[in-house]
Amino acid sequence: MPVTRDDFPTLQLIDHPLVRHKLTLLRDRATSTKHFKELVDEIAMLMAYEATRDLPLEAVPVDTPLEPATGHLVRGKKLTLVPILRAGLGMVEGILRLIPSARVGHIGLYRDHNTLEPVDYYFKVPGDAAERDFLLLDPMLATGGSACAAVRSLQRAGAQRIRFLCLVAAPEGVRRFAAEHPDVPVLAAALDRELNANGYILPGLGDAGDRLFGTR
Ligand code: PRP
Ligand code: URA
């Protein structure tokens, strides 16, 4: 079960032992690009398992080899994953293995190195946004600028039900995000200590996009 904290009311921490184990390997500067990618994929899948525990079910008849029975299937196919490019892409495949029917939108944003403000360059989500449940994906919630801008874009497109899934969050980012989007829950694997002067999370895991795609 996710852990909640009184001082961060919109935050839910998914601190399952396997998530903590894999996150520790992810933080390690010696972890290779290949292993980093596999770990992001696995952690995202484990987090999605927790994040989807409230999915609505419908009762359906099923014939077992022995007798007719009643089973339960997830109702509807309206879940949409939206990675924030680039690093959010690393979280998509693991979640799709659990929920293959989910659609995938994309939001292109990068953080200006000087101002730390997000610059957006791409947006595409399914047309029926108002009827969909969105899972916004990005490994890092640092200043919160990127996640806030992504939620604004989704809401402009009509999205009403959004959750934000990240691996590592900074207190500064969680507070800013909660102030701008108090109705959007944040699910994170870890709440770290603070941001440094360059807006990097401490202890964090470095630049998630560079480590994922080997561009450093
Ligand atoms: C990283 C990360 C988030 C953003 C978080 O992306 O993946 O999108 O920074 O920082 P913030 O909370 O302060 O906005 P980056 O801007 O490095 O873009 P990239 O993935 O394209 O390299
Ligand atoms: N973006 C990252 O990739 N890492 C950080 O620590 C902060 C922003």
Image (cartoon, grey):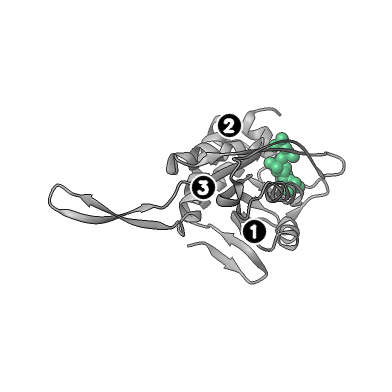
Q: Amino acid at mark 1?
A: Val
Residue placed under numbered mark 1 in the picture = 184
- Tell me which numbered mark, 2 or 1, is placed earlier along the sequence: 2
| Residue closest to the far right | 114
Residue 172, quarter of picture: bottom right
Residue 120 sits in which quadrant?
Answer: top right
- For badge 2, the amino acid type reads Ser
Badge 1 marks a residue whose secondary structure is loop
Q: Could you give the CA–CA distance between mark 1 and mark 3, rounded to whole angstroms?
A: 16 Å
**Disc 2 to disc 1, C-alpha distance:** 33 Å
Q: Residue furthest left?
A: 66
Q: Nearer the viewer, mark 1 or mark 3?
A: 3
215 up-or-down from 160: above or below: above
Disc 2: which residue: 32
Label 2 Cα crowd, 10 Å radius (few <14 / some 14-19 / many 20+): some
Between residues 80 and 203, which one lies in front from this camera angle? 80
Q: Is residue 165 visible?
A: no
Residue 21 spot, x, y in % from top left: 50, 49
How many numbered discs, if any?
Answer: 3
* Residue 56, image x, y percentages: 43, 58
CA gap, disc 2 and disc 3: 32 Å
Does residue 75 appear to the left or right of 156 in the view shown? left
* Residue underneath mark 3: 79
